[in-house]
Amino acid sequence: MSVTDELLAANARYAETFPGPLPLPPARHVAVVACMDARLDVYRALGLSEGEAHVIRNAGGVVTDDEIRSLAISQRLLGTREIVLVHHTDCGMLTFHDEDFRASVEQDVGVRPTWHSEAFGDLEEDVRAQRRRILDSPFIPVKDSVRGFVLDVATGKLSEVL
Amino acid sequence: MSVTDELLAANARYAETFPGPLPLPPARHVAVVACMDARLDVYRALGLSEGEAHVIRNAGGVVTDDEIRSLAISQRLLGTREIVLVHHTDCGMLTFHDEDFRASVEQDVGVRPTWHSEAFGDLEEDVRAQRRRILDSPFIPVKDSVRGFVLDVATGKLSEVL
C-alpha cells in the first residue's frame, strides 16, 4: 500500500465525522503564507478551524508572482484583509545556495531552470524581504496588517519579525 | 484585537503542549499540492501529523513554476517520492474568468498583471491538467505516484480523478 493509499484511508475516517458544508469566503478574513515544511501544521499552530483562513504554502514561505496571484484572489474576490507570513527555524532553504541547486538540476536533467530556488541565508531578513514584496505589489489592495513571524520548530512558538 | 493577534494567542496555547523537534525531511515522503481554500484542513483531511508531508497550497491548487520549484526542492533535497493533488468542490476558481479578473485588476490599479489567475471551468479536467504539468516537467525526478483528487466540501470525502 502506498502512502497515498494510506492517506485515502485516513480521509474515509475523517469524512465519517465531517460537520458538513461551510461558506467559501474565509470567516476570519485572513490569509496565511507559510513554508511547506512538514512540521508546520498551520491550522493547529494558529488555532484555525475549517473555513476560517486561506492557507498558501511553498518552499520557504516566499512571495513570488504565484503567491501574489493567490493573495490578490484572496483579497479581491474572497474578502480577506490580514496577511500572516510564517517562516520557521531549521528551514531547508537555509541549507543550500541557489546557484548550486540550479547547477545541480542542470547537470542532472540537461535543462537549467528558468526559476530560482528562493533559498535564503538569514531567516529574519527573509521574512522582511517577503513582507516587502507584498507591500511593494500593486495587486494586493489591503496592506494594513501584513505581519511576519518565525515559528520555532523546537517549541512550536511564533515570534514576530519587526 | 486583530485576527492576527488572536492567532498569536492561539499559538501560545499550542506551544504549551508542543511535542518538540522533529527531523526536517518528511517522514512519509509525500508532497501534497492543494487549494488554499479555508475549508481544506489538509492535515486533518489526510490524517497527517506534524513532520510527515510537505504541504504546498495556492489559489486553485494549481501547478505553476512556483509549485514546480517547491516540488523539485521537496524531491531532490528532502526525499519525497509521492505527489498528491487536491482540488475541491465549490472552488472559487470556478466562479470567474481569467480575462475578467485581469481586466478588473488593471482597471483598479492601472497595471495589468503579467501573471494569469489560473481560473478554471471544469474541476476534474483541471486536476488532470495540473497532473500533466507535473508529468511534463523535467525538474521533478520521481513521477511513479502522482495522483489527483477532488475533496467534496459537503462531505469531506476525497474522490480520485482518473
Image: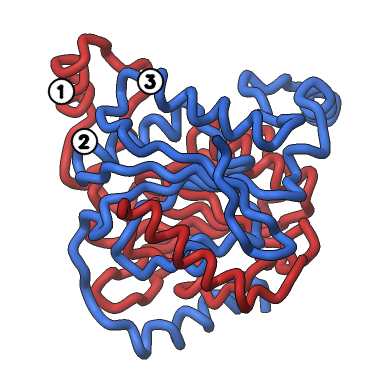
Chain colours: A red, B blue
Tag in front: 1 or 3: 3
The picture places residue B93, in percent across and down from the top left corner, at 73, 38
Quarter of the image where one finds residue A7: bottom left
The residue tagged 2 is B76
Task: Give the answer, above or below, for where B95 lies relative to B15.
Answer: above
Vertical order, B13 against B133 (above or below): below
Is the Cβ of the residue at disc 1 closer than 8 Å to that at disc 2? yes
Mark positioned earlier in the residue sequence (2 or 3):
2
The residue indicated by pointer 1 is A104
Amino acid at dot 3: Ser
Identify whether B122 is placed above or below B19.
Answer: above
Q: Secondary structure at mark 2?
A: helix
Q: Residue at x 62, y 35 (%)?
A: A69
Residue A123 as seen in the image, left or right of residue A18: left
Residue type, mark 1 in image = Ser
Residue pointed to by mark 3: B137
Q: Quadrant of residue A55?
A: bottom right
Q: Is B95 in front, or is A151? A: B95
Name the kind of residue labelled 2 in the image: Arg
Question: Is residue B44 among what the camera can see?
Answer: yes
Foreground disc of the pair 1, 2: 2
Residue B143, picture quadrant: top left
Q: Chain of mark 3?
A: B
